[in-house]
Amino acid sequence: MRIACVMAGGRGDMDLLLHGFAMRAAARGLRLCGTVQVNSDCGAGRPCDMDVQVLPDGPVIRISQNLGRGARGCRLDPEALERAVAAAEARLSEGVDLVIVNKFGKHEAEGRGFRALIAEAVARDIPVLVGVNALNAPRLAEFVGGAPDRLAPTPEALDAWLASVGCAPALRLRGPGQSSNPGREMREDGVMSETENGITYRDAGVDIDAGNALVERIKPAAAATKRPGVMSGLGGFGGLFDLRAAGFTDPVLVAATDGVGTKLRIAIDTGLVEGVGIDLVAMCVNDLICQGAEPLFFLDYFATGRLEVETAARIVEGIARGCAASGCALIGGETAEMPGMYPPGDFDLAGFAVGAMERGADLPAGVAEGDVLLGLASDGVHSNGYSLVRRIVGLSGLDWTDPCPWGEGTLGAALLVPTRLYVRPVLAALGAGGIRGLAHVTGGGLTENLPRVLPEGLGVEIDLSAWDLPGVFRWLAATGGLAESELLKTFNAGIGMVAVVDPARADDIESALGEAGERVTRIGRVVAGIGVRYVGRLL
């Protein structure tokens, strides 16, 4: 009998442990059966939604009923549980190498749930790993007729057990005249020939057809971003761009790369993924204009465990909207489907932007004592500090679907407002002259980003009473008990971009930016000294 169990102390620890183990086993080519929990935030004080994935890549089924905030425990949905059980049993009938069941609980102890699946696997001498708590461990031992191997709750212990039971990808020897190489037969002349039963790339979790379908879906969106200089469309080995056709005579190239960070976690959990593509573009092109460069073209990198064409298309179409709003062409990208690398439904994004400026037009340039600081308002949190945001939301006990405490809509939607794109208004103001430096207020806030545009020996003085702190930051500060200094070095605090301008041109630049749709506030000045000095109060 090759059955083992694992118990973990912390809430959700066992779920994460078994999920990671399943992903590693699948990556080794093992045929899996059973279920793992793909969310692990159940517990008192939060809605209790228990989602399990039928292994290896079957449906995700919610098997608990949402009892609402403040509920204790979970009320199992019997019909949903039976669907999960039936799907797992169907997989077992196809032949598997390893069975994983996220929990041997009350239902299994009473003869229901996954009990029959476990019993059948044991009878077939298929290795079985189950999660169990202290209450049900004796019931599991009684069921299997002896204490199963109890494993330490570590990835190393689970992997060592897998090796000890001799679990390996099934490469079964065939009958006379057949090869042990799956999917190929030996002809009389000794040459291997393909058979219909061979393993494919899709069997390994990579669907090339889905990737091609995505490319076709997003081609119109990418084509809509075309601008002077673009020489190629999607589908080639590289994107081509002609700087001369874009109007440059002696250009200097400027490149920037960034991601969206843990804001993605909220987008994934809520399914509201359309805006993160704009975030991705904004985080790159807003940096480019701080150097004095005009964004020219953009490439994206989208990585996931299993490609869902509809979700990926909504994301890339958001990227295209961000590019179009910035005058930047989406000329290529990479879609990476990597089974075993990401939990179901998860993905990551990275972006790469290239811009150009005429030689000698780079910023910062000429920043001097007395220069005026113009603050351009942000559209919320933008794309930085979301690890802290998520921690504070957790402390609040709110769910993403709850009403937004400081505004309209849901909390999740309010926190997913895309990063503001400053490209067109700022480029127009740059052309009029008088801007000596630009600071994109991202991670590190005003405290860390403004010094990046200052020459040695100069600092800035910022009047915190010059603008009203937006409601989202007031709520975060109050709920998390944030000190004002912590808020200022983590979030943008309502100012997403700062222009350092010639005092003689400040009025004209402020008017030009305002006419272009920006909300502009004079927030301070350049002074002798080092770093950022604050006067007044935000909170």
Image: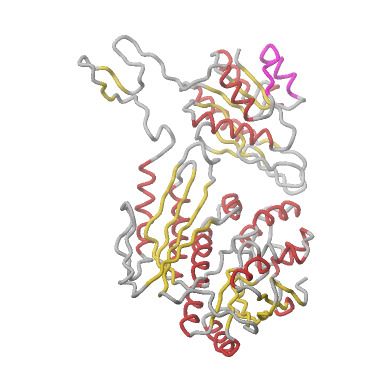
Q: Is residue 161 above or below residue 232?
A: above
Q: Position of residue 485 (x, y in %)?
A: 75, 65
| Residue 145 forms part of the magenta stretch | yes
Side of 43 where 506 appears, left or right: left
Magenta stretch? 136-151
Q: Is residue 422 above or below residue 490?
A: below
Query: What colour scheme governs how the chains and residues are painted in the rendered image of this protein?
Result: secondary structure
Q: Which residue is the extreme one toward the top?
A: 176
Number of numbered discs overlaid on the protein picture: 0
Residue at left offset 76%, top offset 25%: 134
Q: Which quarter of the rendering shows the C terminus? A: bottom right
Residue closest to the eye, 122 or 513 = 513
- Residue 409 in picture, x, y percent from top left: 64, 63
Q: Nearer the viewer, residue 436 or 61?
A: 436
Q: Could you say which quadrant of the image residue 219 lies in? A: bottom left
Residue 531 screen position, x and y as percent: 69, 71
Placement of 294 over or under 389, stated as above or below: below
Q: Residue at x 77, y 59 (%)?
A: 479
